[in-house]
Image (tube, grey):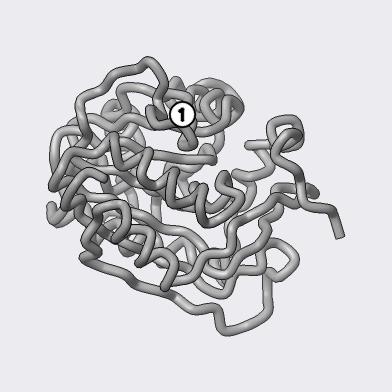
Amino acid sequence: MAELTEEHVLEADYDPKAYMEFFNLNENSLEYEFIKFVLRHHYKTFTPGAVKGDTLISISNSPAIYPLLSACETFKEIIIADCRDQNCQELQKWLKQEPGAFDWSQVGKYMCELEGGRHKWTEKEGKLQKTISHILKCDVHESKPLGPDVLPPADCLVSSFCLETVCKDQSSYRAALKNISSLLKPGGHLVLSGDLGSSFYMVGPKKFFCLVLTEEFLRGALSAAGFAIQEFDVLSRDDDTMQEICDFSGMYFIVARKEKAI
C-alpha cells in the first residue's frame, strides 16, 4: 500500500484530474450513495430558501463544484476559495468552458432531478457559472485565509471534505475553523460536510492524509468557534467496500449558525 503523502510534497503529487474521476460514478456504488447524501442535504438547506443571502464563500481543497449546485439558487454571488493552485486552475477551466474541463453532468443532473427538472442541467450549470464571481487561493492556517484580499463578511460558508484534509491534528483543525469563521458575518451560516473516521483518501495511485474526525470532536470544535449547531446528520457506513480508497466510517452534514466571533 502507498505511503501517506507528506505535506511538503502534497502539491507535487496531487492530481486534480484524478480526483475528479471519483465523480464518474457507478449509480449502484457506495460512493454514489454518499454523494447523493450530500446533495440531498444541500438541496434541503438551500433550495427552499432556508439559508440564503447575498454572498456565499466556498472553502475547498478540491475542484469539485457539487456543494454549490443548490446554493446558486439562493445566493447572488459565490466566491470559491481553494487551498491548491491546481484546483483553482481546473475550476477556472470549467468556469470558462475551456476544452478539457471536467463534465459535471452526472452529478448535476441528479441535483436537477431533486429540484424537479433533470433535463435542465445546462441551464443550472450556466446559472452557477454566472453566480461565481471569484476563484481565489486561500490558506486556512492563516488568520486572514484570503491574504490581502479584503471581502465583506459572507452570509454563508460552505466547505466539504476540506479542513480534515489540510489539518494535521485537532489543534490545527480548531484553529483553521476559527480562521475561516472570520470570513462569515455574525448570524451567518456554516454548511459543513465530509467523512467521519477517515485517516486517508486516494487520489489516483497516491494516498493522502486525512484527520480522523468524530461527531463529538466536531460538536466541540464548532461550539468553541462560536457556532450553534442547527443540524447534524450522519450516514453510517455499513459494509467494507471502498476500504482501499478511503477508510471512512460514515459521512456527516452540519448546518451551524455563527453566534459570536471568537
Quadrant of the drawing holding the N terminus: bottom right
Q: Is residue 232 left or right of residue 38?
A: left
Q: Is residue 180 left or right of residue 208?
A: left
Q: Position of residue 120 (x, y in %)?
A: 30, 45
Residue farthest along the bottom direction in this orientation: 238
State which quadrant residue 122 falls in.
top left
Residue position marked by numbered label 1 in the rendering: 138
Q: Position of residue 163 (x, y in %)?
A: 49, 48
The correct choice, above or below, for 75 with respect to 167 in the image is above
Q: Is residue 223 left or right of residue 32?
A: left
The correct choice, above or below, for 95 with respect to 239 in the image is above
State which quadrant residue 193 falls in.
bottom left
Q: Is residue 24 left or right of residue 91?
A: right
The correct choice, above or below, for 130 with respect to 258 in the image is above
Q: Is residue 151 shown to the viewer in this render? A: yes
Q: Residue at x 20, y 54 (%)?
A: 257
Q: Position of residue 110 (x, y in %)?
A: 39, 57
Residue farthest along the right direction in this orientation: 1
